[in-house]
Amino acid sequence: MPVTQKDLMIKPKDALLKGHFACAGCGSALAFRHAIGSVADKAVLVVPASCASVYQGSGKGVAFNVPTINTAFAASDAVASGISRALKKKGKDDLKVIVWGGDGSAADIGIATEIGACDRQENILHVMYSNNVYGNTGGQRSGDTMIGARTTTTPKGNTTPRKMVPFIMMANNARYVATASSAYLEDFVEKFQKALSFEGFKFIQIDISCPPNWRSDSALSIEISRLGVQTGIWPLFEWDRETNTAVLSRPGKKYGDKANRKPISDWTSLQGRFRGITDEELIALEKDTERQWNFIRKFM
Amino acid sequence: MVVKQETKSMTGNDACSYAALFAKPDVIAAYPITPQTTIVENLSRFVDEGKLEAEFVIVESEHSALAACMGAAWSGVRTFTATSSQGLLYMAENVFWTGYGRLPIIMPVVNRCLAPGWNIWPDYQDSMAFRDAGWIQMYTKNNQEVFDTTLQAFKITESKDIALPSMPCLDGFVISHTTGQVDLPDPEDAFEFVGPYDDPVIALDVENPWAYGSMTGPAQYSKNRRDLIVAMERAKKKIVDVHKEFEEYFGRSYGNGLVEPYGDDEADLTLVTLGTIGDEAHEAIDRLKAEGHSVNALRVRTFRPFPIEDIVEFAKKNHKLVVIDRAASFGHEGPLRIEVEAVLKRHNVDTSVSGKIMGLGGEDVPYSAIIDLAKKELKE
C-alpha cells in the first residue's frame, strides 16, 4: 500500500519524544520518528554503538518510546536474534525486532554478525542508516564512505569505492532488501512496513543527511538527500527474494536513465566533505555510481 | 528426603549437558570449540529429538553466541551457552556486558589454555582473564560436581536479589572428555530443584518501554557498579544456601559450597587448590598421611565471589599454605596465590603462604608431583 504524507502523521504513539540529542538536520532522527513511529506499539529496538545510542537521550530522559536494547558495536544482529527467538518461544512473535544502526556497524565491524543473522533467516529487520562515515567518533572513513569524500582519516579524499551492503545481503539470501532516502519518507515508511510484513531477515539501507560530518547547512539536509537521488548517487530500489527481481522505486525511477540525472557536482558542492574534490575524483565517483546501477539492472 | 538417583557413567561434558537439559533453557546459542563442543552437540540432539523444547541458535561466532543469549535474557527467558579458551576471549566484550548488565546467563567454561601455540589441553588462563567481568565463577573437581554445579548455577544466577551470570568451570579433557561416575536424578526432580523461570530478573515490555544501557553519567554508573559489588557479596550466602538446599534434595555436598576442606582441621602443611588438582590432592594427602606427614587441603570451589572469610578461618588454624595455580599472572604469581596472600595479610593472619604454578597447557599434575611439592615445602 502506498504511504502518503497524511499516513505519516497517523501513528500508534510518538516513538521519538522530546529530549533527544540528535543534531539539527539529522536525517536519522527524522527517519526514526516516522518509521519506528508507525509500529511504535509493537517495536523492540536493538541499537549498536552508533549515533542512535547517543541521540536516544540519557537516563530518565530517554526519548525512545519503545523498548530499546543498546549493544556492543558488532553484537546487534545477534542480540536481535536472541530476542526474536525468545519472543517466539514466549508466543509473542507479533512484536517486531528492529536493529537501528549506522554504516560503521552494518558495513564494517558488525557485518559478520549481520550476515550470520541473515544466513539463519532470523526474523528481524536491520535498518542501516548511512551517513557514509563514523559520525559518533568524529567523522572517520567507513566501508560505506564514497570516493572523494574528505574524512578525518582520509583528509586528502577517500579513494576506494563504497562497500555495497544491500548487494551483500541479496547475495546472502535476505528475504527483502531495499534502499531509501530521508528526503522521501513516504517511500521509506512504505518499504519499512513491507519489510516487517515478511518472515525472515530483512534489510533496508537509508541515506540520511549528517550536517556535522557532511559539513553542510542543516537547513539543506532534505535538499541534499533529494539531490543524492536526483544525481543518481543514491539509487532507490527494492528486491524481493521470492521473485529475485529488483524494482526501482517511484521517487528515483527516472534517474535510472543517466540522461535524466542532475550533475553529481550539484550534490557535492553543497557539502564541505567534498571541498577540493578533483575532476578525476568526480569521474571516479560517477563511475562507481554507474557500477551500482549496473548491479541493480542485472536483477531487473 | 533425598530423591532417587541412578548411577551412570558419562563424560564431564555429558554431565554438563544433562544439567542444562533438566533445567529446560528456552534459548541456547552456541559455537563449536574444542573441548566444549560435545556439550552443545548433546543439547542440539536433545532439541532435535524433542527432549528439550528450546530455540537453538546456531551462530557464526562466540561473540554472537553470547550476544544471542543476552538478547534472550533481556526478553526474560532462561538461557544457556558454553565455551572454551579462544572462544571465551572472542566473546570478551559481551562477557563484561553480561556481567555488568546483570544478565542471568549460564555459561560453563571448559577450561583450555590459550594460544600460541595451538594446544587444546587444560589450564585456567582463559577463565582467569574474566575474573573481574562480574560473573560467578565456580571450579569443579569431577564429573559429578559439573552436573551439580551447573544445576545450582541456574538457581543462584536467576535469583532476583543476585542477578549475576554464572560460569561453572571444568577442566578440558581431564573432566570434559573423561568418563566418570555421575549419579543422575530424574529430570522432574532436577527441574523441581531449579524451578521455572517465571519471575524474570529482567524482561522487555512494549507496554512499559525502557531503554537498557543508554548513556550513563558517572554518578549513576558508579552506583551500578557498587550495586554489583554488593550483589557479589550477597551471592556468597546465596551459594551456601542453594548448596545446602541441593544437599537436602540430592544428598551431596562440597564443603559449604564456597570452599571444600579435606583432611584434618589442622596440619603442618595445607594445599590450596582449584578444580581437578583439588581432587588429585586428596590422593596425595592420604599417601602423605600414611607416611606420617601432617598435610590437609582446602579446595576453593567458588573463586568469584572470593570466599575471604572461609579462607581466613581455615588459614588461622593452620601453619603453612602452599597454593597450586593452574594459571599465571605474568609479572606476578599465580592468581589464586596472589589473592590468598592478600586476604591473609589484610586480616592479619601470619600463616605463611607459598605457591607453585603447575599444569599449564595440560601438563599432567599427578598426585606424585603434589607429594613431591608437599615434601619439599615441609622441609623448608
Image (cartoon, coloured by chain):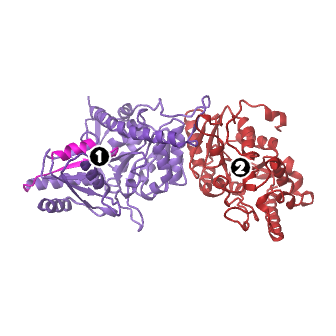
Chain colours: A red, B purple
Tag 1 and tag 2, C-beta contact below 8 Å: no
Amino acid type, callout 2: Tyr
Q: Is residue A75 magenta?
A: no
Residue at (80, 66) in percent of width and height:
A277
Q: Amino acid at mark 1?
A: Arg
The magenta region covers: B291-317
Task: Check the residue under mark 2 and report the chain it is in.
Answer: A
Q: Which quarter of the rendering shows the C terminus of chain B? A: bottom left
Q: Find residue B357 and report its horizontal and vertical position in percent.
A: 28, 61
Residue A210 shows in this picture: no
Query: Which residue corresponds to mark 1?
Result: B301
| Residue that carries the numbered disc 2 in the rendered image | A129
Few, some or many C-alpha atoms within 10 Å of disc 2 (few <14, some 14-19, many ≥20)?
Answer: many
Mark nearest the camera among 1 and 2 is 2
Residue furthest to the right in view is A259
**Label 1: element kind:** loop
